[in-house]
Image (tube, rainbow, N blue to C red):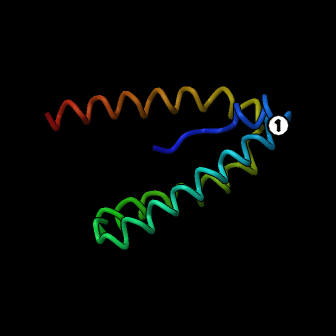
Amino acid sequence: MVESYWCLFIYYLHLSSIIASGLSLFTIVVSSIGGTYAFIKQKTIDYKLFVVIISFILPGIIIGSIVNKFIKTEQFASIFPLWVIIIGIFSLVSAKKIY
């Protein structure tokens, strides 16, 4: 299970929230790479699903990095919660269709 360690970094190491978030992201990336490597060695990865997921992630990364240049932090802080709610509702509706 991937966990976020930013609380540990802020409270015990007395780091700023930006640095703590960066270190937390680094630990998540390293643990994800380690888990992926272990699954590749066990040959339990579905490569077709991997290609589908990457085909959605890469355009999102590119579009997000371009949009990041034009949207201010205050605007993003007001848009992001709405986006998360919309994705959550879409996930609930999709899950009901499956079951």
Residue 92 image position (x, y, % from top left): 30, 29
**Residue ranking furthest to the front:** 12
Q: Which residue is mark 1?
A: 13
Q: Could you tell me which secondary element the residue under label 1 belongs to?
A: loop
Q: Residue at x 67, y 53 (%)?
A: 26
Q: Which class describes the residues within 10 Å of circle 1: few (<14), some (14-19), or many (20+)?
A: few
Displayed quadrant of residue 21:
top right
Residue 2 image position (x, y, % from top left): 50, 44
Amino acid type of the residue tagged 1 in the rendering: Leu
Displayed quadrant of residue 94:
top left
Left or right of 1? Residue 43 is left
Q: Residue at x 81, y 44 (%)?
A: 19
Left or right of 18? Residue 39 is left
Left or right of 96? Residue 34 is right
Displayed quadrant of residue 44:
bottom left
Screen quadrant of the N terminus: top left
Screen quadrant of the C terminus: top left
Q: Is residue 60 above or below residue 5?
A: below
Left or right of 17? Residue 41 is left
Residue 15 image position (x, y, % from top left): 85, 37
Q: Is residue 53 above or below residue 87?
A: below
Q: How many marks?
A: 1
Q: Residue at x 61, y 30 (%)?
A: 79
**Between 96 and 72, which is closer to the camera in this rendering?**
96
**Between 49 and 73, which is closer to the camera in this rendering?**
49
